[in-house]
Image: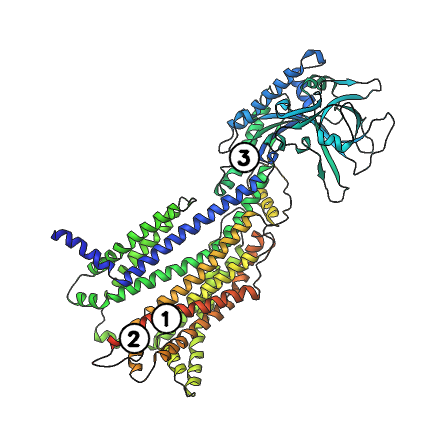
């Protein structure tokens, strides 16, 4: 029982320490916020990627290999007459070709998500023709006339229902020297063209010297059984006519139609489309439903490598009989997403670094609070000969008793949040409890490791005149280093191949520290001027508040530094959120990334211009808004901690002033003046820091956003400025009010605290 009590006693003592609980709660909250933010960001990116992929047609989510059908049949089978082989045998050969292509891709598809082999198929597509009335005389072709492209789809009879007539069966050579090709058209297209089953029409080509037209005879009308299925998405014109609008050309409608299986032998032998060719396309669908945002860059590389190897594999095998090159438009979409994602990572990394520094300072200040609470007891124990390592170890032990359980609970709660975390995130999150446990131990050791003698104290007093010189040297060096870091960030810019430069990511910190150091050196001059002005006035509130600020410069310096950093981070974050052009420049950025990377170029593509914001841009904007709120909130929390650390001295001052007639309302007014000065200095510094910050990161943002720029307007500056002043003052006043509690106990022998 005694041993159990000896184990429970230090745990209970640790949980009874308010400062230790504050440190543990802060650490757990920071860990939970970090994990939640990252998981939310990744989940938003994954949703954005799936939204982008699901909006693509089926033809944009497959690998294709194209060749000329006539050349394929001639080199593969040696067909010269229709009697040599039947149409169903060619259909089987086309299915076999699809499986051969699938096999070649599958052998080389490490990391490429292929659909099952049964999903691979081969289609035939004719050139595009103008649709005209049947006539034996020449008729000129005009732009804007309806056009048609017919083709063959495997297993078409299982995916379409005949509503009239029959499926096409024959291709003939007419006495006029023209070819007659039977086709089946969608029922809606027949109505739009004014045709019916049995109607012939002329399929004409454009150009200055067009090839002879083809007589097409409608033998059947059909309706797709499931027009929204992936089977019909590859060629939506086979479902209904599609409007086509090309800049600089007259709009027109493009229709489609089907060839029959029995016509394949005639197509191979008579070659009615020989003048322009009958294109044979093998389709290998991809499964993109499980692709995550973090896999995009690797998937682009894997697809390009697989297509290059598969093309080489098919060329080396005799069963293909003609050259085939694998391509996929999916790489274009993935490259566009990857470009936007890299730009978003740069946008979120800069405020993320500033937020991390604010959180680190908050933890160190909370750790200092725990050390201050035990300072008197540790000093006595140290004077009695207690070893330094034992006192530091006790501080670490007490912190661990509260920090570890709360952090474990925070990690458990974070794991319940839907989404996923990066594999290396736990290493960075582990730093939080490590700092929270090691911080009090290190501060205890630093405070107790050296006790200067009287002679040493006298020597330190005589050397006080050198302190100012050393401070000037140190601060001057810091200012120079910050400026050099900003210049380096400006010259480095944004790497199109990925990766974020450390100086660019730390630009908000460098800019805030640079401006804060200047303000901290100019602040005492302005403070002395305000003190002289307040001294000439009749009221004592302003004088007392300014005197308190001058008497306790450490909390004021922390307030200026942290709020300047918080305001600079929030300003940059809102400016990035409002930056236009990211979605419009994604195509150019993606093309640049693809061009500079070491890809073989097999899956080349052209990127269409984006017309509006996409899901990833919206997700990044939402995460930036969250970072801005967190920066302001954490900065105000540090102000409250800095105020709370002076609680003992504040109680003493207020207790003495109350004996002189200071009321509770006047005490609050003194606290407002004391806090408002550093807050106003920080507000000015944070606003001014936007200038060197944007000067530093503008080249990187211009590259990442494809020429777009982050502009800091009145709205961007005003919103964080008002929020920081109001919230920081409120947080400081709340901490000051808590510090005034216990004023009565501070007084001696009957001293009364009015309003306490």
Please name which of the two marks, 3 or 1, marks the residue nearer to the observer.
1
Of helix, strand and loop, which one carries label 2? helix
- Which residue is farthest right? 137
Residue 336's place in the image compared with 508, above or below, is above
Residues under labels 3 and 1: Cα distance? 57 Å
Residues under labels 1 and 2: Cα distance? 16 Å
Q: Between disc 1 and disc 2, whose residue precedes?
A: 1
- Which residue is farthest front? 163
Residue 600's place in the image compared with 68, above or below, is below
Question: Residue 651 shows which numbered tag?
Answer: 2
Q: What crowding class fits label 2: few (fewer than 14 Cα within 10 Å), some (14-19), or many (20 or more)?
A: many
Q: Between disc 3 and disc 1, whose residue precedes?
A: 3
Q: Mark 3 points at which residue?
A: 303
Residue 97's place in the image compared with 405, above or below, is above
Q: In which quarter of the image is residue 362?
A: bottom left
Question: Residue 555 shows which numbered tag?
Answer: 1
Residues under labels 3 and 2: Cα distance? 69 Å
Camera sees residue 128: no
Of helix, strand and loop, which one carries label 3? helix
Question: Residue 363 shows which numbered tag?
Answer: none
């Amino acid at each position: 029982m005694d041993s159990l009590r000896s184990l429970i006693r230090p745990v209970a003592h640790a949980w009874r320490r308010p400062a230790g609980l504050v440190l543990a709660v802060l650490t757990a909250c920071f860990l939970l916020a970090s994990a939640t933010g990252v998981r939310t960001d990744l989940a938003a990116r994954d949703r954005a990627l799936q939204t982008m992929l699901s909006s693509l047609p089926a033809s944009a989510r497959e690998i294709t290999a194209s060749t000329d059908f006539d050349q394929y049949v001639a080199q593969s089978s040696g067909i010269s007459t229709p009697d040599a082989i039947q149409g169903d045998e060619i259909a089987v050969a086309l299915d076999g070709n699809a499986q051969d292509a699938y096999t070649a891709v599958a052998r080389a598809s490490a990391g490429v998500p292929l659909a099952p082999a049964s999903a691979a198929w081969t289609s035939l597509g004719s050139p595009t023709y103008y649709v005209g009335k049947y006539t034996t005389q020449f008729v000129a072709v005009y732009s804007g006339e309806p056009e048609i492209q017919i083709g063959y789809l495997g297993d078409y009879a299982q995916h379409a229902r005949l509503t009239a007539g029959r499926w096409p069966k024959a291709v003939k050579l007419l006495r006029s020297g023209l070819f007659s090709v039977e086709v089946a058209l969608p029922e809606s297209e027949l109505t739009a063209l004014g045709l019916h089953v049995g109607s012939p029409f002329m399929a004409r080509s454009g150009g200055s010297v067009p090839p002879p037209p083809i007589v097409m005879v409608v033998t059947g009308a059909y309706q797709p059984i499931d027009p929204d299925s992936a089977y019909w998405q590859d060629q939506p014109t086979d479902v209904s006519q599609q409007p086509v609008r090309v800049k600089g050309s007259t709009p027109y409608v493009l229709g489609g139609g089907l060839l029959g299986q029995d016509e394949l032998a005639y197509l191979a032998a008579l070659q009615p489309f020989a003048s322009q060719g009958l294109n044979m396309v093998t389709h290998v669908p991809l499964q993109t439903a499980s692709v995550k945002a973090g896999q995009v860059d690797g998937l682009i590389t894997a697809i390009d490598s697989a297509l290059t190897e598969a093309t080489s594999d098919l060329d080396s095998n005799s069963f293909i009989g003609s050259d085939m090159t694998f391509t996929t438009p999916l790489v274009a979409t993935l490259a566009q997403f990857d470009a936007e994602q890299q730009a978003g990572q740069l946008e979120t990394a800069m405020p993320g670094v500033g937020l991390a520094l604010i959180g680190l300072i908050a933890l160190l200040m909370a750790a200092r609070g725990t050390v201050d609470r035990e300072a008197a007891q540790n000093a006595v124990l140290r004077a009695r000969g207690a070893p330094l390592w034992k006192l530091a170890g006790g501080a670490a032990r007490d912190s661990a008793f509260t920090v570890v359980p709360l952090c474990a609970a925070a990690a458990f709660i974070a794991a319940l949040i839907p989404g996923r975390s990066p594999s290396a995130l736990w290493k960075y999150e582990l730093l939080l409890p490590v700092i929270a446990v090691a911080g009090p131990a290190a501060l205890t050791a630093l405070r107790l490791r050296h006790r200067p003698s009287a002679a040493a104290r006298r020597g330190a007093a005589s050397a006080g005149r050198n302190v100012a010189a050393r401070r000037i040297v140190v601060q001057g060096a810091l200012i120079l280093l910050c400026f050099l870091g900003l210049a380096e960030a400006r010259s480095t810019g944004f790497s199109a191949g990925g990766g974020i430069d450390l100086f660019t990511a730390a630009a908000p910190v460098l800019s805030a520290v640079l401006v804060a150091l200047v303000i901290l050196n100019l602040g005492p001059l302005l403070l002395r001027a305000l003190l002289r002005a307040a001294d000439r006035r009749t009221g004592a509130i302003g004088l007392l508040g300014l005197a308190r600020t001058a008497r306790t410069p450490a909390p004021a310096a922390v307030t200026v530094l942290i709020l300047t950093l918080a305001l600079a981070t929030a300003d940059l974050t809102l400016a990035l959120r409002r930056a236009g052009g990211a979605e419009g420049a994604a195509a150019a950025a993606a093309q640049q990334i693809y061009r500079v990377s070491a890809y073989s170029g097999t899956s080349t593509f052209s990127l269409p211009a984006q017309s509006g914001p996409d899901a990833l841009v919206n997700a990044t904007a939402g995460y930036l808004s969250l970072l801005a709120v967190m920066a302001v909130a954490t900065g105000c929390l540090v102000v409250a901690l800095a105020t709370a650390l002076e609680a003992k001295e504040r109680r003493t001052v207020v207790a003495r002033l109350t004996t002189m007639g200071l009321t509770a309302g006047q005490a609050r007014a003194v606290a407002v003046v004391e806090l408002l000065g550093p807050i106003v200095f920080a507000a000015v510094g944070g606003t001014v820091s936007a200038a060197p910050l944007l000067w530093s990161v503008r080249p990187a943002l211009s590259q990442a956003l494809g020429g777009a720029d982050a502009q800091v307007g009145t709205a961007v500056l005003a919103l964080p400025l008002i929020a920081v002043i109001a919230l920081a003052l409120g947080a400081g006043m709340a901490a000051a009010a808590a510090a005034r509690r216990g004023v009565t106990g501070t007084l001696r022998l009957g001293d009364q605290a009015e309003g306490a």
